[in-house]
Image (tube, coloured by chain):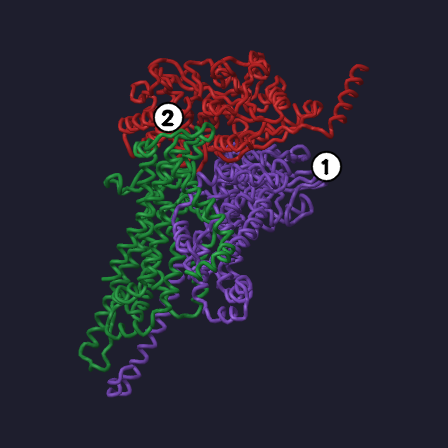
Amino acid sequence: MRRSGRELLPALLFLLPFLAVLVVFFVYASARAVYFSFTDYDLFNAPAWVGLENYRALFRDDNFLYALRNSLVFAAVVTTVQTAGALVTASALNRRVRGMTFFRSAFYMPAVTSSVVITLIFLWLFQRLGGVNYLLTAVARNAPAIGAFVLITVIAQTLQVWGERRRWRGAAAGSKRAVAALDPALLVVSLLVAAGATTVLGLLGHLAPRGTEAIAINWLQTRQEVPAGAPFPLRAPLPLVAIMVQNAFTTIPTFMLMFLAALQDVPRSYYEAAALDGANAAQQFFHITIPSLQPVIFLVVSLGLIGTLQMFDQVAIFGSAVPLQSVITLAYFVYNRMFPGAQLPEVGFASAAAMFLAALTLAIVLLQRTVLRAEGDR
Amino acid sequence: MSVSAIGTGAAAILARERWEARRRWSRAALAYLVMLLFSLVFLGPLLFAALSSVKTDPLAYPPKLLSPQLSPANWAAAASLGRQGAGAPLWGGFAPGAAVTFELTYFVPDGLTAEAPSANVPRRRPGGGLGAVQRITYAADYAEVGDVVEVARRAADGGELVTYRVQVGYPGAGPTIDRLPLDVQSPSREQRFVSSTLPPTRLERLGLVASYETITPGALGYLLGNYRRVFTEARSVTTGQSLFLRWTSNTFVYAFFRVLITLAIATTAGYALARLRFPGRNLVFLLVLFAQMVPTQVLFVSNYLVLRDGIWGLSSLWGQATLLNGLPGLLFVTALNAGPVFIMKQFFESLPREVEESAMIDGAGYWSRFSRIVLPMARPALGALVILAFQGAWNDFFWPLVILTTPEDVKTLPIGLLTFRNVYGNSGDWGLILAGAILSALPVIVLFVVFQRYFMEGVSYGGGKE
Amino acid sequence: MRRLFTAAMVALLAAIGTAGAQTIVRVQGYGGQDPAIVQRLIDEVIGADLAAQGITINYEPIETDYNTVLVNSLSAGTAGDVFYVPGETAPGFIATGKLLALEDLVDTSAFIDTLNAVFSKDGHVYGIAKDFNTLAVFYNEDLFDAAGVAYPNADDDWTSFADKLARVAALDPGVYGACIAADTARLGAFAFANGWTTFGADGGVDLTSPAFAEAFDFYSGLVTSGAAAQPADLGAGWPGDCLAREQAAVAIEGAWILGFLRDNAPNLQYGATFLPKSPTTGLSGNYLYTVAWAVNADSKVRDAAVKVLEALTSPAAQQFILEQGLAIPSRKELADNPYFSQDSAEARANKVVFEGASHGNVYGFQFGTIGTDYMGPINNALTAVMTGSVGSGAALSQAQSDLTALLQRAAP
């Protein structure tokens, strides 16, 4: 205690710049947001105390209910997709091959550019006559060729694995070879066979593209929600789906790198030992990769939840290109009530929504901590 | 290789090794294949956008990777036209004394008499939106369009291909004009436009009119037309300066100061939290954790008002009644950034205490221990912090959106791009938007390529996008 | 001659005398196409005269959402001295107390009374309408000719109009009869034709009445039947853009489209006519759009600001704006303008827009203090029905309940 008192003055001096900012822009701001949330205030006339009225009004406001639903669905879907996607890509890339650094940097490229740049590009791609619909159309039209390729690959691989396993079944224990279903040596052959066969079939005219009509999904200016039959809280509007795709696209590389950094610390001997014991890729993934990455997964899910619950940029950038209710999130709702444009600011109402958002974020992050911690202890 | 393998024959061992070798290179080949596929997924949209940013209309359907702008033959034609227009094969233009020869070919079906199309230089304003405020000189006021004459005729399936030539001159004196638009109207829809020296910007009135933004673009002007428009079209109303350049310099200034502020605050606060013992330390640390978690939008109502009033009038000390619409306000409010403080605290805690303690025995004060011993040891972490802060500032969206609203001159690049999107997106002019987006991403991409290591380190500190 | 010379000398001396002490008046307006015209208005028409009085205008067009920027800058004290106040958000701005009452400073009787009313409250006039606009049907003559369909005209009712559009749309899969946005600012005009009003006699809103539902079905039906497309479907930002790119034969817009077409589609052969009539009432409907110039009550250069406002709304300024094809003058004396009888597509279109104000059931584009938030639920319903996700009955009752909730929260 004596020591701690002695260091108080230097500590204060060191902390002075940070504390000044923290007090004004965090402590005071939080306190004032709490106060505003109990008042009716339009920036021009003095705030009037209204008690809990703003909070009650929140749940009667359609935009707020949409914002709440959109935020939760967005956070759930994107956090899951980006964590899983990053894990899978990271374990696929956890190889020591020449040129890996180059590729890793390449994948990280979408994450270094600003959200505005990426969102604008995706907004362009998701236009009715844009790249995404064109890609879907191309896939649909070339379904025969794609189907043939996949089918031939599967058949070739199955035949090879069956042949190899039969060949080595009777061999002496010492020369026995474990032949995994996706054995790389065999898979390369299967892929080459399939590519060759598909090309030949194509040249012979058996795989002519289908003349299906162009797919022209209206991704933006629409109120359509998917999946169609689900109840309101479980549906996602199409424009929000477009944002989900964009968001996963930019966050997967970042999280993938975090996983990769952690994977470098997992001894290779674990995998080698597992391979000798005949564990296949999936078993290795679930029994070695996931448990060793437990702390990083925890971090990634936390960061993902906080990030997705705050989603704002994309809504602002999509702007008038989409119906507001199809993309509005809680963060944007606060902004929208503070700067409504069409009428005077509803500062109190905005603050009430802000308090709700803060409480929701803290609650979800704490919940996730308890759940993942418990899983880790098991 | 297990021990029991020794017992088997040499041939078996050899076969097994061959098999293992095959497995190794197969695995490598598959790894490269997977990486190529991932590259396609992650870089595809960016590259596709970059390729499309040179197109006249990036929304043309079906989208193609290549456009007339990427054809060397058109570059040659554009260069030659640029030379004819202003003696400028690279950037083109229309200058006094110019004589531009332009050819168009029409298909005339059997039974129809070929008739010369009519050509004129329209008073067409380049693009819309932000450029509209500028007074521009119209080429129409100086150009003289000669007669359209037939120069060639050859048979084609079901009719004839007739080529016409038109000369556009610039007699007398006058200013050099950026572009020379041209409209050529066919006498009838049956006499169909086929090709011309340069492809038309668009066909109007159901194919009747071939319309050209400019017929003297020059090679670079043709390829990078949209990029040039990014700089030339959007200009400040008050100064006439290029807005895009202004936004870029604003962003650099903002990023520079933001890096300095982040370094100053994160190192001092991080050091105090990591090394010094004082009452309330846990409370401050708890606030750091909370500040990291609470969404910006929760605090922004109050912070916006605090800045609006110049931090309780503090800013009037240097003559600003409000901190809105200026970089100082932006720097103040974004100084609240708990992430870097947290990173530095963790880093300082990982440093060995012994070095510091030996300095303490020498009687060094807190400040000299911090600046002479701890900071130099923190160099790698500081590098990552600088990069993260720069990237964060360059790409920052929310606070600039709230604070920098008017005039256009005060904005940073991301917010400026949003202006582009609002103004040009309304007339479907995506070429300019994409060009602006690609340009604005370049500095960070260059930085990334040069300082990759620090970016990757930043990620491993749990950063990501701050 | 001598008098002129003396006058010129006096003006020159005045200019020299005040050159060092020019009062700067900050003027804020819309972005987009507008600045080109306003800047020319300032430079060519009113600038010299004001400079002689020692007043310089600093013009700042606002490219982002105008109303938001205006609210914020008014609350921050950074707003301009003279600025636009849109009719649809005027009640909100008047309530801030930041607009200067003008009735004693400006001769308001020279302006059309209904326009003054839009910017008035409790006997005070807070803005001088700079112009007004109504909706008209703008059509591409080439596309109608190619389809062999008669141009839309003043005698069309909804049925014959929709029929014409459908026949043009049949011409080519890439061409639509019309470009129609999910926008209450257009739909409302058709509902007016049917006798519906923005607020009912009791101050409430009735979206489920047959008058409104019929207009709603007609308007959304244009899209669901395939005769018309939404701008987004064609990669366009607004209907004017579809028209300029010849993707749609008809756009329902105001005179603001003329400047856009001049710059973006100078070769387009277009005409304009009145909105089609309701088959039920035999009348057409229309919105009256208007924007005013207002003076900041906190302005430090109030007198100069009022002078600038007077110059911006002077007969010379309005004549200039009219001839630029941007809007119709708000001064009574300019109603009988020789410009309207000129033989050009623009002048003819302007005449239609001008006469639209007295053609059938016309109401102001205004929604009380909730401003354009009023349109949100109806726009949502339109989008939902146009994209085929909901039927019109369900969409309308949803819109009705949303709008009622909105009005309840806004009520004090």
How much space separates mark 2 and mark 1, taking CA atoms?
Answer: 60 Å
Name the residue that disc number 1 marks: B174
Say what secondary structure mark 1 lies in. loop
Q: Give the class, few, some or many, for how many residues have Cα within 10 Å of label 2's Cα (few <14, many ≥20).
A: few
Residue B159 in view here: no
Badge 2 sits on which subunit?
Answer: C
The green-coloured chain is labelled A
Say what secondary structure mark 2 lies in. helix
Task: Name the spot of residue C152 as percent of width and height, x first.
Answer: 43, 21
The foreground one among C367 and C76 is: C76
The foreground one among B108 and A367 is: A367
Chain C on-screen colour: red
Badge 1 sits on which subunit?
Answer: B
Name the residue that disc number 2 marks: C410
| B185 relative to B278, above or below | above
Disc 1 marks a residue whose amino acid type is: Gly
Q: Is residue C288 left or right of residue C221?
A: right
